[in-house]
Image (cartoon, rainbow, N blue to C red):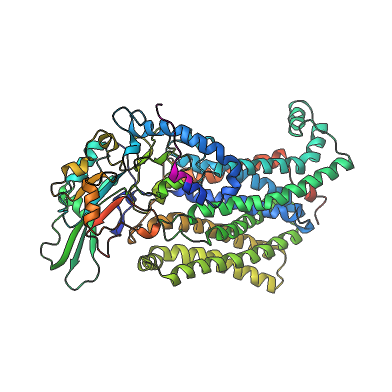
Amino acid sequence: MTQDPSKDKSGRRAFLRNAGKALAGAMGGGALLADSAARDEHVAGATGTQSFPTEEYDWKEHRWAYGIDATRCIGCLRCVEACKTENGVAGDAHHFRTWVERYVYLDGEDKAHVDSHHDPQNIAASGSESEYRFDNRYKDANVTKAFFVPKMCNHCEHPSCVQVCPVGATFRTEDGVVLIDKEYCIGCEYCVQACPYGARFFDDETRTSDKCTWCYHRITKGLQPACVEVCPVEARIFGDLNDPSSPVSEFISKNRVQVLKPETGNAPACFYVGLDKEVS
Amino acid sequence: MIMLESAPFTGYVYPNETIIPWTLLIAIYPYLTGLVAGAFTVSSLHHAFGMERFKPVARFALLTSLSCMIFVPLPLILHLGHPERAMNAMITPHLSSAFAMFGFFAAFYVLLLLLECWFVFRADNVARAQSSTGLLRAFYRAVTLWSDDVSAKAREYDRKWLLALAIIGIPGAHGLHGYVGFVYGSLKSREWWGSDLMPVVFIFSAVISGMALCIVLYVFAAKVRRVRIDFACLKGMAYTLWGFMMFTLLLEALEFANLVYKGREGIELVMEYVRGPLFVRMFVVQFGFGALLPIGIISAMIARDTRGKAFVVGLVISSLLVLMSVFMMRWNVVIGGQEISKTMKGLLTYIPPLYGRQGILAGIAVMTAPFLLLWLLTRLFPPWGDMSPEGSK
């Protein structure tokens, strides 16, 4: 416990927005104090390391963000495999911290055909739920437009998952990463419901919620997230918004970027280039 | 190796959606709280509003409400990944969560019901303590909290408390249940749930389910005890049920009409779901057999002034249909919401497993438990004082 526990801004904003604040007013002070005091432990529970800042890393100096250039993605799914290996995610077709979607428009059709590697046809093609690939189902079709879209937790500025967690086990760090304290999570899956992006799932090993952490154990040591590291075409970009020359700062400043489902008000921190009307 | 119950899907759904997070137990949870609120309403019609015709069922309805309320947290706790951490929600409530206050609301409501029961049954328990011996006497003495003053002044004091508790209890019970509706309705991630009307629909359907349960249990208990049924009371419940059913149906229709008329992004998928997998569950079972048919039966019985056995049979059948319909509504909301993918491009199918903590058998056990408790409570604290064989019409 080396840090001065600061206020959880997103939690406080959400709290202020809460229509029931008057009802809860009497209890509010105590609970917020408990929140900030407990946060150090939550960080430890989420990362398996001590809390921040450490001697090497001060989370107040960073503001992480993620860029995805969908025009570059080739659907090789090395990111999916790297993520599963790096983070010990269950090797089946129902638990993904990151996944890739394939959008295909066929001649004469208005709507895209969408699938991902969890699709039974793709699993049949790979031969195993733990081998990720897209099958060749469109090889004889007249394809007019096709592209891949990598997906993951958007580490939103106003995360609906954090808002609904009844115990405060999931939280947003000072450097902008949404984490889960797996030693405190009760496994109610309210956050799984609340995430508009389908980024969360129930981890049967820990019996808690789980999702992408942007490889928090790596980025706090100066490394890239595993998915960014292995991407052969630089479709995935990661960096610090506080540093104007970081890859992600340049990606955002040099492109017209979009976020997924902006109407939710979640304000994602994953910025996309090359989306399409069908992508949601 | 952990066995996964994955949901089959059509179209495109996010990979993580293929395991349905909220299962049968989470459909049972709002059903139980609804029964609590409804049974409490029946009890309050007498205790708060002084409607004499509901007197024969008022105390029984109160016990029914208590029995269900005690088991409300059970399906939630059974569903948790870490049930042993359940109290975290009360130790460190995260106040921005719609669910953070559940533990406090539930505890408050159990206390309120216990307190109301204490006042309602106090005089009876004093009498029982005085007429029994040994352990039984000690038990009833303990239940009265060693207070044996049943003077007219003390009874008047009891009545004032009862009125106050019933008046707090009505918004309390309905608040607790409307809150359940808010837990779903406040989520922006699911079009099927994100409705402002959800809490109101939940409250009205709660009242009809609790009312229907009281009708069925009252008639059942009268048959078992071989006493005559108080028709004025039964008819009163039939009228009230009828009225609330009209409101419920109207609200549900309004909610659905809003969803369709607004026709936001993904409405094509919602309509595909409604016309396909949901058609039988919602339009045939929930609305057809569960709402229109009982409304028709009760309307016909009121119009023809049906009396006697025919009325009892008609009303019990209608009430059973209502109970089935409200459960179907909970199912269609909780499970239905999750069967429509967040991608708005695909549909999932939830198949409840038979065994296991989230299975059908566990669900049946959770639904049976309140009635075993109710049976025990009616043995220990007979609520029928006012309709004993000698006293009935």
Q: As drawn, is A63 to the left or to the right of B30? A: left
Q: Is residue A117 above or below residue B316?
A: above
Q: Percent position (x, y) of residue B298?
A: 64, 68
Q: Quadrant of the C terminus of chain B?
A: bottom right
Instruction: Examine the structure image and report whether residue A7 is included in the region drawn in magenta.
Output: yes
Instruction: Examine the structure image and report whether residue A265 is included in the region drawn in magenta.
Output: no
User: Residue at point 53% right, 65% down?
Assistant: B252
Which residue occupies the foreground of this view, A238 or B141? Answer: A238
Q: As drawn, is B183 to the left or to the right of B122? A: left
Outermost residue on the left side: it is: A140
Is residue B226 among the parts visible in the rendering? no
Q: Is residue B173 above or below residue B309?
A: above
Which residue occupies the foreground of this view, B27 or B173? Answer: B173
Q: Percent position (x, y) of residue B318?
A: 60, 63
Q: Quadrant of the N terminus of chain B?
A: top left
The part of the image, by quadrant, that contains residue B281 is bottom left
User: Residue at point 82% right, 51% down?
Assistant: B391
Q: Which residues are magenta?
A: A1-12
